[in-house]
Amino acid sequence: MGDMTGPILEPAATAATRGREIRLEGIAKRWGGTTALGGVGVTVPAGSFTALLGPSGCGKSTLLRIVAGLEDPTAGRVLIGGEDMGARPADKRDLSMVFQSYALFPHLDVAENITFGLRTRGVPRAERRARLGKVADLLGLAPYLDRKPAQLSGGQQQRVALGRAVISERPVCLMDEPLSNLDAKLRQSMRAELRALQRSLGFTMLYVTHDQVEAITMADQVVLMNAGRIEQVASPHDLYERPATTFAARFIGTPPMNILPAAALGATGARLETAAGRALEIGIRPEALRAGAGPWRMQVTGGEYHGADALVEGRIGEAPVLMRVPGQSLPVPGAALRLALDPRDLHLFDAGTGDRVDLPGLAQLIARPEDPAGATGAHAPHPNRKDP
Amino acid sequence: MTRRKDWIWGWLLIAPALVFIFLFTHYPAVMTIGESFWSTPRGGRPSRFVGLHNYERLIHDPTFWQVLGNNVLYAVVTIPASIVLAMVMAVLVNRPFRGRALARMAFFTPTILPLIAVANIWVFFYLPGFGLIDQILGLFGIGQTNLLGSTATALPAVMVVSVWKEAGFFMIFYLAALQAIPPQLVEAARIEGAGRWTIFRRITFPLLMPTTLFVSINAVINAFRLVDHIFILTGGGPDNASSLLLFYIYETSFRYWDTAYGATLTVVLLALLCLLAIGQFFLFDRKVHYR
């Protein structure tokens, strides 16, 4: 494993100035009748780590290839560092790229693979060797420089691909699911290393992944995509705390957020819909559902023991829900739990469009003590938390 | 006990294949080597042991040296020419364009035609006065040629035919090899600033080396083995100008029935092919990267 706290290519002081901003304006890509990307616009701040997240087939890899110049958009503009890339070919965009398959040249040894780009650009031999030495130390590849890729483990091959990307010291680095071929343990340690590498070198990272954990743990900014469109652009924190659509709500978090029709909450739901003036869906994360003295009732239908915690399967009204509880307190199927809801844990979405609805005074609407809440019967006043 | 049984079973299982390979490959080869030390039996004069007499005769046979020289020239020209052409054609039809299937088929057609048919087509091309070449040359006011009939041009004319025939065949192997190269390699090289030529020189060409080795061994063997077109085109003439080693062996053995000398020539041809194949393997082996 490479020592990420060791010598770095460039002093961190210059790091902030190194990255370049990437701006995408109305990028569309169509092949015949199918639309891969429908007018995508997003800005990747200079020096940031931005993850393109989405299910497979959502167009994130196509978008990355368009930024790289390997694919031409049907419409729209790519600006890097404020300059329109237009018809500029891939090698003139001043970026590097790591492929999912690593794309190492099988007939060249590690040293030749890493310095390939320096050679094609005519960097003198002495400088090539000096830079190779630094990168090899940085990534812990020094003992393997004369090996062929086939003689390396998956993790080592991954490092060679990284080495080839960082040796050129480009302001922008694109990565297309670079960790997906590694085993789980290695993936976890590489996540931290990649993040540290990007921080210390200061380049702008555009990172494609379908793994929400990678996006949440590594990125400064997550661009969540679905079916060729952007669902939400936000920090990992906001993406989790304030999902902009039901798709974002369901995509982030394991297990995903429970989305219930408002009717499942009985009178409370009806009151919320009246206040919002439209049909609503209500999202509650499994970890936000808590047993308590609230007016709502959850019928337990099953459970799954995970060790540290457990998932309770059940129903609120007719809607199936999951609830996360500590591992030792798994209720038996058939039991009825009373639930307490903190208004701050509720996410409201427009039932028609799936967009987030922000309802002022939500806490009061939830906490009305005289609420009979369907068939739940009499109950103690709900202890209200202080309003936001 | 069981080991012994396994051993017997093993031999029994390979016996059928072994019988045939001995009967039709090893036995004739050994017989040929033996025959080269004996004289040709003539009417009333049975074959007798002559030692190295046949080999002495071979060394002093000017036709043998001429034919060997022809064959070496034939190999040295046609092998690189057909390999380079095959590679170029494969690279051309590997990229997408309108009518690609048609182009591939056109390049491959010479391969599916029998060599005799190919030779017949080219006899028409080369025909003095009426042939395609002379008709085209006639448009530019250039007079009649006799490419197959003159000692200077007969061999080159034969070479053109075999390059035309072989290149399409080798192209198929290169095409398959090109399609086995992951497109990400080319994309990675593009991002690293490599132009088309650099990509070919530093990525594609080295990755095609195993194919080049395979193709070149085949080409060498074919250069000494395929002589069908000579029967149709020139009959080895004029004055042995277009005769190749195997054609000379055929003539010696089955036209003049000098079977002992034919056997001697065959032994020389076999030794030559063995040497070439071994040499190629060792020469290429260091430069070839096998995935």
Image: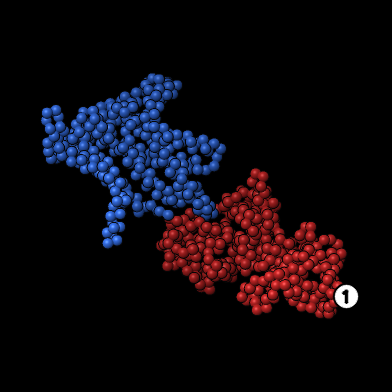
Q: Is residue A124 visible?
A: no
Assess disc 1: are there few (<14), some (14-19) or many (≥20) residues with their C-alpha within 10 Å of its C-alpha. Answer: few
The residue positioned 15% from the left and 39% from the top of the image is B37
Q: Nearer the viewer, residue B108 or B207?
A: B108
Q: Is residue A106 left or right of residue B269?
A: right
Identify the element where label 1 is drawn: loop
Q: Answer left or right for A56 relative to A248.
A: left
In this rendered view, identify the residue nearer to me: A8 or A196: A196
Q: Name the residue at 86% across, 73% down.
A: A371
Residue A19: x and y, percent? 61, 63
Residue plotted at (52% across, 43% down)? B95
> In the displayed structure, does residue B40 sit left or right of residue A237?
left
Q: Percent from the top left, x then y, of residue A167?
A: 51, 62
Against A363, is B172 above or below? above
Residue under pointer 1: A370
Image-quadrant location for residue B135: top left
